[in-house]
């Protein structure tokens, strides 16, 4: 512990005492855990510059103390702000929140890890630049860099985020600064315009890994289009989704659907507007079938809801709409939401006054606006509502303002299998996990997103009551059982929380031994995030 | 040398004597060099399976003999089939030419390194699959895998090839087999559908590197579209190209131009149909201005020719054509080539008979068909003609059948700077290299390709007469001078030949020390391709 005290002393000199947190209440904020498995950091450091990160890493090496870097620490459902294991010092990069560069014609930004979705979106609006960023449903206050380094995906044509980054600046465990792409060449003109550079392309190494600390990132922005039209397709029956997936695949592949398409089941959509109705179902989850059916009927929700956006010039969007109708018009009920429709709806709602119908229309218009905003990179906290499904207090006052599922005590774990973009695979994944959720007594929230042209990214949510120890225990068993079934069937997750990192390694897989050898070469002391996506 | 003899003995036992080449005439075929700087291999091994590659690598480690892997060795202008240095044994993977898997609905193939462009294109045609592959202008006999691992680019919407691969199988220097993406998990359903897998994304490491030998690759195919329309835009004046680039950029960025757009200068286009006219210019290159102007006038070639393809449903292509006319209709002369136009042209040429006009129209129809074929992934050797510009014998008999610029003794070196997609940068790159080419007495062939939505990939060709020692020496000086000027101005190459690999390292660049540390971790004996994209 003398070593740790000496390190703290060095860090206090370096950062000033206010940016070295050790008080229990300060650390507690980082321990909040949607998985109900908080891990205490030894301390929290808050550097404000690349140079400070270099100095922190060098001293951590000297004192042999492992670090755990965070962007804003809002990795909800996948570990939150928790280190991967005990005995680590958090490096909170949230204060490094500068937009270092913004280029209009070539449409990119260079950003630090603390830059939030709301911050960059607001900046673009304020500067009146004709550019949109891609955003996720994780709310306004999440980090762009943090999500990208976890290989998250968004909602726009730039939603496959790994395709839209170029030029990373990284602090390695030995304190060296590594710039990827062309950025390490003097005066490189295409540092943030061409990702690969010349020589081995290293960027992928620094995603889902513990090989370095990324301190800035080139992030491509999308030129605004004349028209955006949000499509909502409602599929009445459970099995009906298979044909819809197969009919949409060619349109996703040929670019008619250039954006990430999200497919949610009824519960996923319901949970966006309500929490578990304990008064109507006092026995707890899962929701009884008749009640589920009634709630869906009242809300006008089909078994599945497909959500996508069409972008382009008017003629392009009109053609794309025709193609959508031709492909799935007989399999689903289609609605298209655009600015004009929202304005009309808003007017109609005002005319209807404050009665039940007017309020309902008004709520629909609000939701439509949120969806259309997401398509244009304007984040919205409302899409976090699902996390609160089993929270005893329901949605906190003022929701979604300042929503933070971890701090608010939401119980939530995500399973994220990747599957071939085929209806049969969707049904198969459902068939694998549905009985597991039923046995353990949980509602099964499902989304399947067309994360590229050939694969669906599933997100299956286990929502549980953190205040009920038995439910927490059941949630873990449910997670483990579903995880094991999916892995055995070859539906491997695209991303996991710390609880599953070891389970990714069968023990005789040369992928993980290769990862271990690279780790040993770049960080022989295991200073950076030991255990993170590194089972050996 | 006893060690080498022992290794040969082991390899002969392993592969059979016929697949261990040591005879001088056998090795000579691998020494052919477009750069006029042949490097002799110690021997050539021709494994036919992944297992044989593993065994070859293990024994190379035992005997401590470096290996140099090739796919088909047609890396013209960038090192051909030559090892990076002396004392290496070539591992020629050309015999590993199986199409391991082909999936129609999800549109991908899994291929070995020996699979050529013509082979896969022919296979798709034979099976009547509604899929196109991306191809390059390097001719029918080049390897797809070889080009992809060099990060080459093609001509279709899948021309940014790094975006369309998933799942590599690699032999590491210790003989381990590494599978990337999800492929290393048992029964993985999305092994070739989602590139990143879970954990660090390693694929980039095995491009432009010497970290392993790739023995198979998942390669995405493009669903055929109803319409393909090839656009040729002729820009009359040299400076006129800048406005065209700036006007096309938004259309490339918004996906109207989804394919790689190629921009060639007059000489590049001229060289596709003729070699240097020594009879008219006996003093040698560069082509005298009046002659250049006259040749362009006769062939109807402007200062720049822009070549692109539009894909989609009829309404989409019609809209895209309108957008192209609106953007550059006043800056360039546009022509669109499609199947119908070619059929009409072909008919007209036949009606005109065998006179001069008929022959000229017929040649134009042929060229149009080749261009349209490239847009559909059908390779054509005619685009190699430029390499023969300074070859004394001109185009070999039967060209392009079996064309092989290295074996045919063409002198050619490529400089491939990446630049921001801006007209001003194109002019700047030209201004930097033009005087260098003039001083050294070479024609300057230029192409600039929109290799992604934000960058141009320049390819500047130095064509020289390999039989003229003075011209060879001048070509090297020209290359070095142009390379240095481009680097100093921040126009870094996307790819280099072996002659420039050391020049990429300033000596105090942590990118290259990181590369060296990874190499040491994965291949401490430096068994695989020492020196390849590895200056330290």
Image (cartoon, coloured by chain):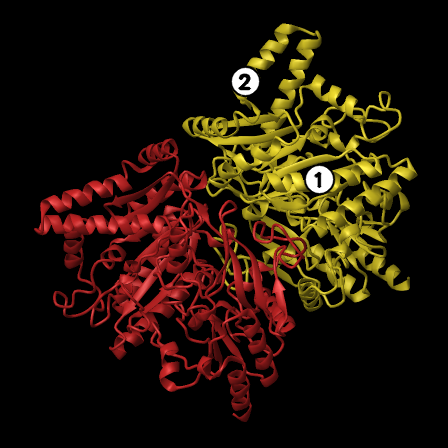
Chain colours: A yellow, B red
> Is residue A126 visible in this depiction of the protein?
no
Q: Is residue A149 above or below residue B478?
A: above
The answer to whether marks 1 and 2 mark residues whose Cβ atoms lie closer than 8 Å is: no
Using the numbered discs, state the Cα–Cα distance from disc 1 to disc 2 in whole angstroms. 38 Å
Q: Which residue is the extreme one toward the bottom?
A: B2
- The x, y position of residue A267, in whole percent, is 73, 29
Q: Nearer the viewer, mark 1 or mark 2?
A: 1
Q: Is residue A88 above or below residue B412?
A: above
Q: Is residue A499 above or below residue B317?
A: below
Give me the chain letter of mark 2.
A
Quarter placement of the N terminus of chain A = bottom right
- Of B493 and A342, the residue lying toward us: A342
Residue at position x 14%, y 70% in the image: B282
- The x, y position of residue B271, in whole percent, is 24, 59
- Of A178 and B163, the residue lying toward us: B163
Which quarter of the picture shows residue B475? bottom left
Residue that badge 2 annotates: A341
Give me the chain letter of mark 1.
A
Which quarter of the picture shows residue B348? top left
- The x, y position of residue B532, in whole percent, is 50, 71
Q: Earlier in the sequence, mark 1 or mark 2?
A: 2
- Of B448 and B194, the residue lying toward us: B194
What numbered label is drawn on residue A17?
none
Q: Are marks 1 and 2 on the same chain?
A: yes
Task: Using residue B102 as the reference point, say whether residue A115 is left or right of it.
Answer: right
Residue that badge 1 annotates: A431
Residue at position x 60%, y 38% in the image: A423
* Residue neighbourhood size for the residue with mark 1, other residues' Cα within 10 Å, grouped as few (<14), some (14–19), many (≥20): few
Describe the element under mark 1 as helix, strand or loop.
Answer: helix
Quarter placement of the C terminus of chain A = bottom right
Residue at position x 29%, y 75% in the image: B472
């Amino acid at each position: 512990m003398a070593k740790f005290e000496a390190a703290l002393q060095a860090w206090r000199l370096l950062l000033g005492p206010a940016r070295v947190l050790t008080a229990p209440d300060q650390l507690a904020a980082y321990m909040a855990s949607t998985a109900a498995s908080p891990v205490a950091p030894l301390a929290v450091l808050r550097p404000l510059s690349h140079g400070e990160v270099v100095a922190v890493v060098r001293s951590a090496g000297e004192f042999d103390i492992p670090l755990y870097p965070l962007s804003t620490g809002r990795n909800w459902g996948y570990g939150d702000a928790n280190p991967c294991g005990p005995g680590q010092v958090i490096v909170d990069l949230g204060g490094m929140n500068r937009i270092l560069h913004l280029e209009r014609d070539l449409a990119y930004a260079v950003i630090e890890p603390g830059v939030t979705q709301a911050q960059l979106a607001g900046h673009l609006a304020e500067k009146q630049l004709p550019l949109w960023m891609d955003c996720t449903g994780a709310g306004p206050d999440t980090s762009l860099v943090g999500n990208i380094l976890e290989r998250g995906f968004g909602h726009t044509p730039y939603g496959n985020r790994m395709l839209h980054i170029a030029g990373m600046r990284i602090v390695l465990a030995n304190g060296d600064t590594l710039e990827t792409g062309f950025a390490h060449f003097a005066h490189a003109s295409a540092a943030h315009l061409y990702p690969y550079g010349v020589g081995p392309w290293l960027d992928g190494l620094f995603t889902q890994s513990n090989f370095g600390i990324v301190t800035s990132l080139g992030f491509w922005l999308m030129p605004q289009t004349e028209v955006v039209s949000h499509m909502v397709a409602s599929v009445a029956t459970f099995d009906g989704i298979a044909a819809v997936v197969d009919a949409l695949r060619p349109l996703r592949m040929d670019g008619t659907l250039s954006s990430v398409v999200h497919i949610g089941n009824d519960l996923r959509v319901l949970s966006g507007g309500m929490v578990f109705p304990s008064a109507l179902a006092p026995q707890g989850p899962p929701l009884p079938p008749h009640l589920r059916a009634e709630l869906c009927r009242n809300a006008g929700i089909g078994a599945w809801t497909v959500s996508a956006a069409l972008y382009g010039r008017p003629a392009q969007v009109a053609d794309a709409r025709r193609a959508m109708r031709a492909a799935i018009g007989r399999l689903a009920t289609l609605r298209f939401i655009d600015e004009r429709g929202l304005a009309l709806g808003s007017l109609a709602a005002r005319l209807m006054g404050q009665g039940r119908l007017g309020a309902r229309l008004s709520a629909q218009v609000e939701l439509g606006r949120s969806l259309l905003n997401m398509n244009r990179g304007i984040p919205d906290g409302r899409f976090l509502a699902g996390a609160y499904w089993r929270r005893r207090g329901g949605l906190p006052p003022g929701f979604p303002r300042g929503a933070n599922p971890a701090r608010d005590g939401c119980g939530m774990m995500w399973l994220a299998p990747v599957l071939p973009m085929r209806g049969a695979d969707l049904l198969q994944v459902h068939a694998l996990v549905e009985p597991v959720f039923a046995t353990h007594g949980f509602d099964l929230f499902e989304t399947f997103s067309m994360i590229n042209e050939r694969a669906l990214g599933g997100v299956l949510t286990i929502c549980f009551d953190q205040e009920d120890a038995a439910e927490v225990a059941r949630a873990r068993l449910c997670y483990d059982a579903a995880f094991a079934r999916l892995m055995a069937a070859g539906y491997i997750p695209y991303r996991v929380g710390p609880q599953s990192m070891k389970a990714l390694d069968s023990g005789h897989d040369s992928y993980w031994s290769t990862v271990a050898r690279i780790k040993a070469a770049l960080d022989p002391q295991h200073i950076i995030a030991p255990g993170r996506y590194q089972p050996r």
